Image (cartoon, coloured by chain):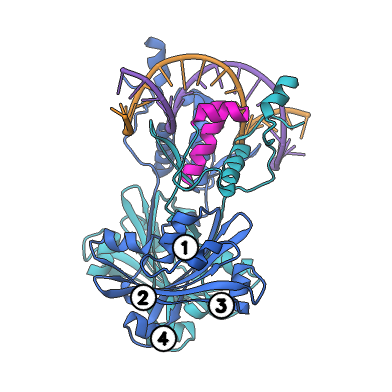
Chain colours: A cyan, B blue, C purple, D orange
Amino acid sequence: MSGPVSYVDVKSEIVERIRRGDWAVDALIPGEVELAAELGCARGTVNRALRELAAEGVVERRRKAGTRVTADRNRPARIDIPLVRSRIEAEGARYGYRLLGRRVVAADSFVAERLAVAPGSEVLSIECLHSADDVPHQLERRWINLAAVPSARAEPFDEIGPNEWLVREKPLTDFEHVIGAENAGPAEAARLAIAVGDALLVVERRTWLGADTITYVRLLHAGASFRLCSHTALPVMPLRLPGKTGRRAQQASA
Amino acid sequence: MSGPVSYVDVKSEIVERIRRGDWAVDALIPGEVELAAELGCARGTVNRALRELAAEGVVERRRKAGTRVTADRNRPARIDIPLVRSRIEAEGARYGYRLLGRRVVAADSFVAERLAVAPGSEVLSIECLHSADDVPHQLERRWINLAAVPSARAEPFDEIGPNEWLVREKPLTDFEHVIGAENAGPAEAARLAIAVGDALLVVERRTWLGADTITYVRLLHAGASFRLCSHTALPVMPLRLPGKTGRRAQQASA
DNA sequence: TAGTGGTCTAGACCACGAG
DNA sequence: TCGTGGTCTAGACCACTAT
């Protein structure tokens, strides 16, 4: 009835066995060849399934030692940090952008270190505000490395935000995020229309194109109204694999 | 001189071309067959390279439409949320654990909703503190679904934390994280030895095993001393691929 | 040294979806 | 409709590492 056994089927089957307790935490599971024979597919299919499960942190694999169920639940959690605009519009609100400040400055030690440029190098400093239905949502403070992105010097940034502009201008190869919590000072409180001392969720981001640091940005959000979410689900889908009867019997009888 | 062209080589080459500007943001890149011919490898190799780059958010792929360089820099950022203990010990500090409270309670609506159990169901409520060199580091408030993990009822949790215990006890298939910022109230301030009103970085986590919600936990950290970091780098490694001379010529002459 | 995963290949069929 | 990516297969060789 069903077609060939896919790697998704194999993943589901493995997860299901772990869930049922067939293989306990830390237990060694069968080798690729054995699983392939049992499930009725090529070794390459089992390999891909196990490789992806390893990438998801469900199992750990080592040559010669075999594959075992991961004991440590410290699994890589994917957190999507969305573009402000997308996020706001996704929630059905009207996105608003306002440029608060823009000037070319000499990098102080704080910025120079983060952009990996010499102190005193020219950088473009930008402050702007993103709002949802006219309610302040995110205060953005950004520094752009003008040596790496000279074309930014001529850009006014009065209509579109620096992020959206950079997206179109430069691809990137690396990025770094740091998430923290801070208390709002008078300046932040005024910009975000909150009280001084309110908790802020701060996302710092740096991006690179090859060896060049492109930009460093601090995104400040009122903690009361903003959270970062992620949900990671393993593929638990309708199984097509048979039980003990075994697919091989079906194949044999086909 | 070199062996067969690997998928890592292909990834590097593609990233390098994007970096050099050969393919601009949003540009369509050649098809798998063409790339395979050009680079001198099997289509499967190119496919794996592009598939992984797509998973990393570098390119977007659609059948029939082809593959193009991702314009949106809203790429999935991996954030590792480490076990407290690992994190503290990794920094060379002495890990300390203290149980502050433990009791079986009837779930109120807040907890019931998060654990997906009926209000009034029995849950195990735990509060504990993790410290680094005797300095409070993380305040943990956890609820465990006793219907899903009945063995937790007999566990004192006075020596090892509930997370470490759960790790050994149950595998998991899904988890969810929510990160936010809050101001410390009197209780939190006292536990964490900070001032009332100080910013807290709050990580909420829920985990599932199949359809069962296992646990819901709130991890509170003093914002002044705790941050979540992630660095995502694309594979930019020494290239083995030849230039215009072409590896195929080498193969042919070999 | 031997076993296990890691990968490449060459060929084939299929499913989605742009035009 | 038909091109592009998605996947499976069967076989082979290789690299790491436990013993």
Read off the residue under disc 2. B223
**Number of numbered discs visible in the structure rendering:** 4
Q: Residue furthest top?
A: B253
Amino acid at dot 2: Gly
Q: Do the residues at discs 4 and 1 belong to one chain?
A: no
Whether residue B99 is situated above or below residue B246 in the rendered picture: below
Whether residue A175 is situated above or below residue A192 in the rendered picture: above
Q: Where is residue C13 in the image (x, y as percent from the top left)?
A: 70, 24
Q: Does the magenta stretch include residue A205?
A: no
Q: Please give the label number shown on residue A163.
A: 1
Quadrant housing the C terminus of chain A? top right
Label 2: chain letter: B
Q: Distance between the residues labelled 3 and 4?
A: 20 Å
The crowding category of the residue bearing disc 3, from other C-alpha atoms within 10 Å (few below 14, some 14 to 19, many at least 20), is: few
Q: Nearer the viewer, mark 3 or mark 1?
A: 3
Name the secondary structure under disc 1: helix
Label 4: chain letter: B
Q: Please give the label number shown on residue B187.
A: 4
Looking at the rendering, the stretch of residues picked out in magenta corresponds to A31-57
